[in-house]
Amino acid sequence: MILEHVLVLSAYLFSIGIYGLITSRNMVRALMCLELILNAVNINFVTFSDFFDNCQLKGDIFSSFVIELDEV
């Protein structure tokens, strides 16, 4: 994949999440928007880990750690 495409997708998801978090009055919707923000950050972690340091899986491990903390 091309790095710019993934970063644009991540920025798009992040901006949707921020907009929804700011304008939401419903708590469930706010939590769903927070989930979108965290997923956008996880996409960045995995992409940069794959693009810059292919041998070490630091971005993959950290994104799985964020997913586990999000489910608690």
Image (cartoon, rainbow, N blue to C red):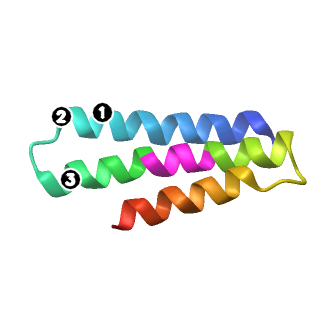
Q: How crowded is mark 1: few (under 14 residues within 10 Å), some or many (20 or more)?
A: few
What label sits on residue 71 in the rendered view? none
SS for tag 2?
Answer: helix
Q: Earlier in the sequence, mark 3 or mark 1?
A: 1
Residue 71 among magenta residues: no
The quadrant where residue 4 appears:
top right
Quadrant containing the C terminus is bottom left
Name the residue carrying label 3: 29
Q: How crowded is mark 3: few (under 14 residues within 10 Å), some or many (20 or more)?
A: some
Q: Give the amino acid type for the residue marked by disc 2 in the picture.
A: Thr
Q: Give the amino acid type for the residue marked by disc 1 in the picture.
A: Tyr
> In this rendering, is residue 21 above or below 65?
above
Q: Give the amino acid type for the residue marked by disc 3 in the picture.
A: Arg
Residue nearest the viewer, comparing 68 with 10: 68
State the residue at coordinates (29%, 55%).
32
SS for tag 1?
Answer: helix
Residue at the limit of the structure toward the right, as seen here: 55
Name the residue carrying label 2: 23
Percent of width and height locating residue 43: 61, 49
Regarding residue 63, the answer to whether it shows in the image is yes
Percent of width and height locating residue 42: 57, 50
Name the residue carrying label 1: 19
> What residue span does the magenta drawing correspond to?
38-43
Separation of disc 3 and disc 2 at Cα?
10 Å
Residue nearest the viewer, comparing 32 with 12: 32
Main SS, magenta region, reads helix
